[in-house]
Image (tube, rainbow, N blue to C red):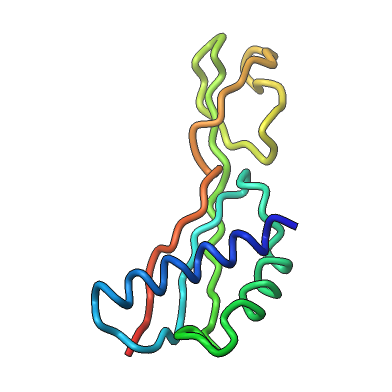
Amino acid sequence: MHEMSLAESIVQILEDAAREQGYVRVRTVWLEIGQLACVEQESLRFCFDLVTRDGIAHQARLEIIEKAGQGRCLACLAEMAMAAPYGVCPVCGSQNLQVTGGDQMRVRELEVE
């Protein structure tokens, strides 16, 4: 389950930022997750709750902002929304598509004290 390693990475980001910025507690984490990032959100929430116990983010709220997948057809250069990292261009029918967005995950914002 890679969601556990993702949750651990998020906690590391929070701890590093706390050392740099001097806060002692994280109340809320806003996390952007692209639709094409291959992250199971409920598993990530479960893992986040596990790895934040007894740390600076203990009982922090995890707010997930879902970003739509975006792509471009390399044959006709049409831009399109993508629900999967593969598919068929709705304009020309080509299967030669490139993901251009919605395949990342990032900490967008924190509420801290």
Relative vertical location of residue 106 with respect to residue 61 in this rendering, above or below: above
Task: Give x and y (percent) for residue 82.
Answer: 63, 36
Q: Nearer the viewer, residue 24 or 71?
A: 24
Residue found at the far left of this picture: 21
Left or right placement of residue 90 versus residue 28 in this view: right
The residue positioned farthest toward the top in the image shown = 75
At x 67%, y 48%, the residue is 38
Q: For this rendering, which residue is in front, 86 or 52?
A: 52
The one of 14 and 77 positioned closer to us in this rendering: 14
Residue 84: percent from left, percent from top: 69, 37
Q: Name the spot of residue 25 as percent of width and height, x first.
A: 39, 88
Seen in the picture, residue 5 relative to 95 is either above or below; the reply is below
Q: Which residue is found at the position 42% from the left and 66% from the top?
A: 13
Q: In what quadrant of the picture does the N terminus appear?
A: bottom right
Task: Give residue 56's quadrant in the image.
Answer: bottom left
Left or right side of 30 for 39: right
| Relative depth, front residue between 1 and 64 | 1
- Residue at 62% x, 60% y: name it: 5
**Which residue is located at x 67 percent, y 41 percent?**
83
